[in-house]
Amino acid sequence: MTIKSIEQLEDMLSEPSQGVIETLGRLEGDILTLGVGGKMGPSLARMAKRAAPDKKIIGVDLFPSPMDRGRPGDHGLPKFGIETIKCNLLDPEQLASLPDAPNVVFMVGMKFGSTGQEALTWAMNAFLPGMVAQKYSKSKIVAFSTGNIYGLSPLALGGSVESDAPNPTGEYATSALGRERIFEHFSRTLGIPTAIIRLNYANELRYGVLVDVAQKVWAGETIDLTMGNANVIWQGDAISMTLQAFDHVASPPFVVNIAGPELTSIRRAAEEFGAIMGKTVSFTGTEAPDALLSNGRLGHKLFGCPKVSVADMVAWIADWVMSGGASLGKPTHFESRDGKF
């Protein structure tokens, strides 16, 4: 199978699993998504609407967002029955004006460009969660975080698990841990049922670690192997697991890794892209014995294993890149070992 258009891709990314349909069928009330204009937000909002067409799904962001890349400022979400609201969430008056909602997905965060804008990074990643928790203290909250809060993990361990102590490197990862701690504080003190999603790393055809590797292979660029392994998961599978986390919100927060079932070798992925594309691949550096890796076993146990394999992603991405498919233009910088993004 090949994916020939953005419309086909976004339909695939937003197709709800049976688990999502069942979870949202049990969930009482509507869903508000903060940060809907990011990489995963439009697909998540659409999946929620497709799974629960009778619920009101509201998407909030500072439209238009830098991720629009020629799409409508509201990502065309209203035509799918999703209400959109433009809001600067750091403005207390604008945040206060948002409608109440019994269920909130918090997708706001700053990673790229955090180096040089450390103050804004902390405001977005650690201050804003407190404002949101107070505004939505009567709601269930599912909040995105990142596996970067664990720091580098030896390959031999198979990735960090949820009970491992955080060991973040750099302003971004440290502020992301701050986001978790703020949500945890308000969950404990106000009794907010919360789930924290530690994601590592979502991929689709326009963005992700595998896209970065494929684009470099296609362009004939040298592949840096120092960060020699990564977790990759199809974005649709990651969204499916995230929405199912509403079944597990708790106080103190329920924490779960969302990651693929295997460690993906950057060398092997590049060689596979090279074989498909007819390109000779050149490498630099040597694989380190550790990487930013998460163990997704708990998520697989609760929500089911990802339906899209790494092999499928490689084949789809190779075809997309070779045919000149659109890109979000946002390299993941997964190679970074110093936490600077």
Image (cartoon, rainbow, N blue to C red):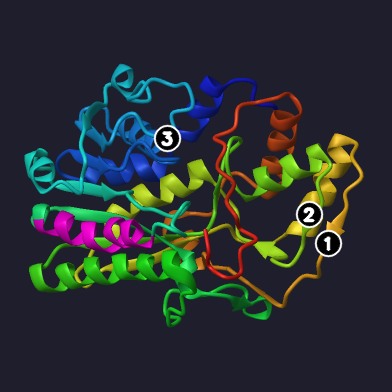
Q: Residues within 10 Å of mark 1 (few under 14, many from 20)?
A: few
- Relative to the observer, which residue lies in front, 210 or 337? 337
Question: Do the residues under discs 2 and 1 have CB atoms within 8 angstroms?
Answer: yes
- The residue positioned 57% from the left and 70% from the top of the image is 338
Percent of width and height locating residue 70 = 47, 21
| Secondary structure type for disc 3 | loop
Mark 2–mark 3 contact, CB under 8 Å?
Answer: no
The residue type indicated by label 3 comes to Pro
Kind of residue sitting beneath label 1: Thr
Q: Is residue 263 visible?
A: no
Q: CA distance from mark 1 to mark 3?
A: 32 Å
Along the viewing direction, whichever of 66 and 116 lies nearer the viewer: 116
* Residue pointed to by mark 3: 66
Residue at 51% in and 20% down: 7
In magenta stretch: residue 128:
yes
What is the CA distance from the residue labelled 2 to the residue labelled 1? 6 Å
Find residue 191 and report its horizontal and vertical position in percent.
11, 67
Q: Earlier in the sequence, mark 2 or mark 1?
A: 2
Judged from the image, the secondary structure of the residue bearing numbered disc 2 is strand
Tag of residue 284: 1
Q: What SS does tag 1 mark?
A: strand
Residue 176, located in which quarter of the rendered image?
Answer: bottom left
State which quadrant residue 207 falls in.
Answer: top right
Mark drawn on residue 124 = none
Q: Which residue is mark 2?
A: 223
Work out whether residue 305 or residue 182 is closer to the camera in this orientation and state it: 182
Number of numbered labels in the structure image: 3
Find the residue positioned furthest to the front. Answer: 116
**Few, some or many C-alpha atoms within 10 Å of disc 2 (few <14, some 14-19, many ≥20)?**
many
The span picked out in magenta is: 118-134
Instruction: State yes or no: residue 217 in magenta.
Output: no
Residue type beneath disc 2? Ile
